[in-house]
Amino acid sequence: MGAIASSTEYPLMHAAGYLFENGSAYAPGSHPKTPVRRSLWDVEGRLHNLAYMAPAIDLFDVQKTDLAPNWNGARQFDFFMNADEKANFMGYLYVALRRLQRTGNLPGLRAGLALLFAEEDGIITLRDAVSAIAPDLVQKHDYFDEGKEKALTRSTQIADLRPSSN
């Protein structure tokens, strides 16, 4: 963790398309003298969260994944999807971010991260953030089946990824 920002030190930011110059990170198209103001470790950390939950998110969103299962990531994502509404929307936001990442939409991924940080700073709600980039997830969340039960629950859509006890 040196004082100089580099693509080697922040590989997930580099993979998300951030550029590094003169020891700072900045978004493509922005001026190099307008560096990322948020702690680079905050950005890298959220991208790490996305990476370790990615297999569970893919199973939830597209019902398949080419990624190796990650028990800790599956457990974290399960918490988001089965806790209170705020946690649900955090999970949905990570689903939206993963969609952008999976399709190679790096500008969208960076914009989605900005929405996540705007929520953390109290500027918008998680529901606002998800509505902006994945309105279908808000619709699914709000849908109830005839028995007044949530139609969308992670536990009924994703196979159990816990290690076997054998």
Image: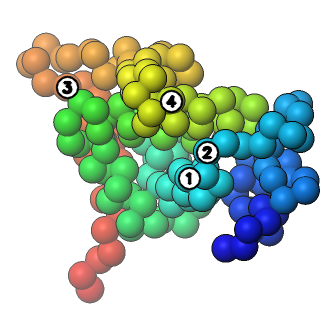
Q: Nearer the viewer, residue 111 or 139?
A: 111
Q: CA distance from mark 2 to mark 1?
A: 7 Å
- Depth check, mark 2 against mark 1: the one in front is 2
- Who's the residue at 38% across and 23% down the image? 125
Say which residue label 3 marks. Answer: 150
Q: Amino acid at mark 2?
A: Arg
Q: Amino acid at mark 1?
A: Asp
Q: Quadrant of the N terminus?
A: bottom right
Figure quadrant of residue 89: top left
Residue 155 visible in this rendered orientation of the protein: yes
Residue 47 visible in this rendered orientation of the protein: no
Say which residue label 4 marks. Answer: 118
Task: Please tell me whether mark 2 sits on a helix, a strand or a loop.
Answer: loop
- Who's the residue at 56% across and 53% down the image? 42
Q: CA distance from mark 3 to mark 4?
A: 28 Å
Check the image and name the residue furthest to the left. Answer: 147
Whichever of callouts 1 and 3 sits on the residue coming sooner in the sequence is: 1
User: With 85 as the anchor, is 132 left or right in this view?
Assistant: right
**Label 4: few (<14), some or many (≥20) within 10 Å?**
some
Residue 56 placed where, x, y %?
A: 44, 52
Q: Nearer the viewer, residue 48 or 162?
A: 48
Q: Amino acid at mark 3?
A: Lys
Say which residue label 1 marks. Answer: 42
**Label 3: few (<14), some or many (≥20) within 10 Å?**
few
Q: Amino acid at mark 4?
A: Ala
Residue 163 placed where, x, y %?
A: 33, 75
Say which residue label 2 marks. Answer: 38
Q: CA distance from mark 1 to mark 4?
A: 13 Å
Q: CA distance from mark 4 to mark 2?
A: 11 Å
